[in-house]
Image (cartoon, helix red, strand yellow):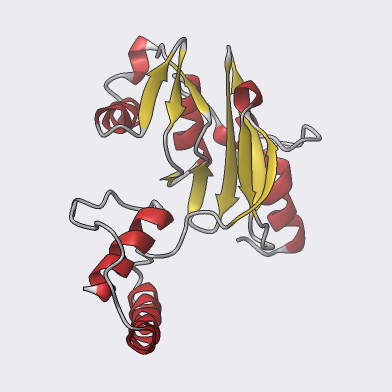
């Protein structure tokens, strides 16, 4: 029972997938010596699952620093490995904070997206993805905008900025760091100059 409880807790914490098992409950009584053994087994499972390409228990963003987010909310921002860049996407009355990682663009919990979308976007994959996020509760209407209820991974910067801005966009130009440099300048142009693409 401890391993099941630990797996559900870690999967919920990682926020990569929606866990359908509602029986997580409270931590089961486990003697300390057995809990230590179970934790070692869980760590092995976690490593094997990630090695097989399914990082179910690995967080989308590793939390550390706190910064001001959209609407004055405080967001915990990921530590920044060499391949990771924290950026913002701003539009009419909305702002999202995201991390560009080796896996794609992660929009952080608390970020805001436009409530209205361009009609041309609705039948497109970005429009369908946005509606899916609304349907499963990852985006919740709060006043004039939607709020991200958890960290959400997108395959590309443009897919992420489309959802935030409610229209087709070039995410490489829309996502910018605090000094105003675009993600294109921070990642693609830098990669071309150095010959290393991450």
Q: Is residue 184 visible?
A: no
Between residues 9 and 157, which one lies in front from this camera angle? 9
> In screen coordinates, is 128 left or right of 168?
left
- Percent of width and height locating residue 62: 57, 58
* Residue at image point 35% right, 79% down: 42
Q: Where is residue 44 in the image (x, y as percent from the top left)?
A: 37, 84
Q: Which picture quadrant has residue 47?
A: bottom left
Task: Indicate whether 57 appears above or below 25.
Answer: below
Residue located 29% across and 59% down the image: 26
Q: Which residue is drawn at 51% across and 25% down?
A: 112
Q: In this view, does 176 lie above or below 60?
A: above
Asked where in the image residue 127 lies, by quadrant, the reply is: top left
Please name whichever residue, 175 or 47, is drawn nearer the observer in this view of the structure. Answer: 47
Q: Quadrant of the C terminus?
A: bottom right
Residue 129 image offset from top left, x and y in percent:
31, 33
Among the 4 quarters of the image, the one containing residue 172: top right
32 on left or right of 25: right
Q: Which residue is drawn at 40% across and 14% down?
A: 117
Where does the N terminus fall, quadrant-wise? Answer: bottom left
Tell me residue 151's x, y (percent). 46, 43
Can residue 139 be seen here? The reply is: yes
């Amino acid at each position: 029972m401890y391993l099941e409880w630990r797996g559900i807790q870690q999967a919920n914490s990682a926020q990569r997938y929606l866990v359908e098992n509602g029986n997580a409950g409270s931590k089961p009584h486990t003697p300390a010596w057995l809990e230590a053994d179970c934790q070692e087994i869980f760590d092995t499972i976690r490593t094997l699952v990630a090695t097989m390409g399914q990082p179910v228990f690995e967080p989308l963003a590793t939390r550390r620093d706190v910064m001001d987010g959209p609407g004055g909310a405080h967001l915990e921002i990921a530590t920044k490995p060499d391949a990771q860049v924290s950026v913002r996407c701003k539009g009419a009355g909305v702002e999202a904070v995201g991390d560009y990682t080796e896996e794609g663009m992660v929009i952080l919990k608390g970020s805001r997206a436009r409530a209205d979308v361009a009609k041309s976007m609705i039948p497109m994959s970005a429009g369908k993805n946005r509606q899916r996020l609304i349907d499963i509760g990852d985006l919740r209407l709060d006043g004039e905008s939607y709020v991200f209820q958890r960290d959400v991974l997108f395959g590309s910067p443009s897919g992420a900025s489309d959802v935030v801005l409610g229209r087709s966009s070039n995410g490489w130009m829309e996502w910018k760091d605090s000094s105003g440099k675009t993600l294109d300048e921070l990642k693609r142009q830098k990669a071309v100059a150095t010959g290393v693409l991450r």
